[in-house]
């Protein structure tokens, strides 16, 4: 396994007092852009505060990034900003219960992502990178996407008339 592109090791027994600021270097941002399939990541930072709960380390804060990627329709480059909350829970390896592959697990919106770590450090940088990956829309469209579809003769869902047996039944009910 290769080393993470953005690595910031934190020791649970020596958590920083106050907020920790993570700023990705140009090389780290370039490597992450390659990993996530975007043109570039001009900026990436996060501000995180730590707390503890039993053996778990709670990391709460915000991630800020600028992304450049091609429009999914036109290929034109788009620039946009991402601001995502970070709510993570780092737990020692073995503390997350093992569930059977087909076992149903109920989670609610208050449940945090639990990230297991081994040894005496966890990688906050990789957790930030994974949060950014989830915030990137791989099919993001630019302002010219609708016009490009029209020029290519591709109708939007709004322009298509419903068809099929259910649509016919609905039409019959409305007329009937």
Image (spheres, rainbow, N blue to C red):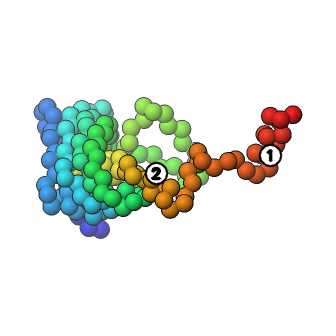
- Pick whichever, 4 or 32, lies toward us: 32
Residue 40 at x, y percent in the picture: 24, 58
The answer for how far apart the CA atoms under marks 2 and 1 are is 29 Å
Foreground label between 2 and 1: 2
- Pick whichever, 50 or 140, lies toward us: 140
For disc 1, the neighbor class at 10 Å (few under 14, some 14 to 19, many from 20) is few
Q: Which residue is at the far front?
A: 151
Of callouts 2 and 1, the N-terminal one: 2
- Image quarter in which the N terminus is found: bottom left
Residue positioned 14% across, 57% down in the render: 26
Residue 53 at x, y percent in the picture: 30, 32
Q: Is residue 26 above or below residue 2?
A: above
- Pick whichever, 8 or 118, lies toward us: 8
Residue 104 at x, y percent in the picture: 58, 44
Q: Which residue is at the far right?
A: 176
Residue positioned 27% across, 50% down in the render: 79
Locate residue 114: give its quadrant: top left
**70 horizontally vs 165: left or right:** left
Element class at badge 1: helix
Q: Which residue is mark 1?
A: 168
Locate residue 167: give its quadrant: top right
Q: Which residue is mark 2?
A: 146
Residue positioned 79% across, 40% down in the render: 171
Q: Is residue 112 above or below residue 73?
A: above
- Image quarter in which the C terminus is found: top right
- Pick whichever, 43 or 58, lies toward us: 43
Q: Decide if residue 59 is in sight here.
A: no
Residue 118 at x, y percent in the picture: 28, 53
Asked if marks 2 and 1 touch (Cβ < 8 Å), the reply is no
């Amino acid at each position: 396994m290769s080393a993470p592109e953005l690595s910031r090791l934190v020791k649970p027994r020596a958590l920083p007092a106050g907020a920790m600021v993570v700023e990705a270097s140009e090389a780290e941002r370039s490597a992450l852009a390659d990993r996530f399939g975007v043109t570039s990541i001009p900026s990436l930072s996060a501000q995180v505060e730590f707390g503890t709960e039993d053996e778990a380390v709670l990391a709460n804060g915000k991630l800020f990034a600028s992304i450049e990627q091609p429009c999914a329709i036109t290929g034109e480059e788009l620039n946009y900003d991402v601001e995502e909350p970070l709510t993570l829970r780092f737990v020692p390896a073995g503390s997350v219960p093992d569930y059977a592959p087909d076992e149903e697990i109920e989670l609610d919106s208050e449940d945090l992502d639990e990230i297991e770590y081994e040894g005496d450090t966890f990688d906050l940088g990789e957790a930030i990178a994974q949060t950014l990956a989830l915030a990137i829309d791989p099919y993001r469209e630019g302002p010219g996407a609708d016009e490009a579809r029209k020029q290519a003769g591709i109708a939007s869902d709004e322009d298509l008339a419903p068809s099929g047996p259910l649509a016919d039944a609905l039409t019959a009910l409305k007329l009937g």
